[in-house]
């Protein structure tokens, strides 16, 4: 599917099909345009793989991460990966965790 087809599909999709209405919009409805990927267009990471810091060869020392510590277990979620996926669904111990960016 080419980019123009995708844009047309997003613009022509009724708002109610996207999970919301524009009934209370303060901007005229005809001036509201869809943008970005469609709903569920960015896949979440569902089973992230982790390696020790010593094994990582694609992260530089000054790269940013979102760091999480749960019950003494630390994880780092690189921003350069979250830029592409935006959501990581993970479990630390028995606790479910959603990391978003």
Image (cartoon, helix red, strand yellow):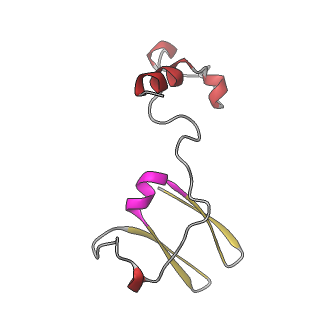
Residue that protrudes farthest toward the right in the picture: 94
Range of magenta residues: 78-87
Q: Quadrant of residue 69?
A: bottom right
Question: In terms of depth relative to the viewer, which is nearer, 55 or 25?
Answer: 55
Question: Can residue 93 be seen at all in this image of the molecule?
Answer: yes
Above or below residue 17? Residue 42 is: below
Where does the image place residue 77, in percent across and percent down from the top left?
Answer: 46, 68
Say whether residue 52 is magenta: no
Q: Residue at x 47, y 22 (%)?
A: 5
Where does the image place residue 52, in percent across and percent down from the top left?
Answer: 46, 83
Q: Quadrant of residue 47?
A: bottom right
Q: Residue at x 48, y 28 (%)?
A: 1
Above or below residue 62? Residue 16 is: above
Q: Residue at x 52, y 45 (%)?
A: 42
Say whether residue 79 is magenta: yes
Q: In terms of secondary structure, what is the magenta stretch mainly?
A: helix
């Amino acid at each position: 599917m080419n980019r123009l087809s995708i844009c047309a599909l997003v613009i022509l999709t009724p708002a109610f099909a996207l999970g919301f209405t524009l009934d209370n919009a303060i901007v005229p409805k005809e001036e509201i345009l869809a943008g970005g990927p469609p709903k569920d267009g960015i896949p979440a990471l569902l089973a992230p793989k982790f390696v020790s810091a010593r094994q990582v060869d694609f992260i530089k020392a000054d790269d940013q991460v979102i760091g999480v510590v749960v019950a003494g277990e630390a994880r780092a979620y690189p921003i350069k990966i979250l830029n592409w996926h935006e959501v990581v669904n993970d479990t630390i111990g028995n606790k479910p965790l959603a990391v978003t960016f």
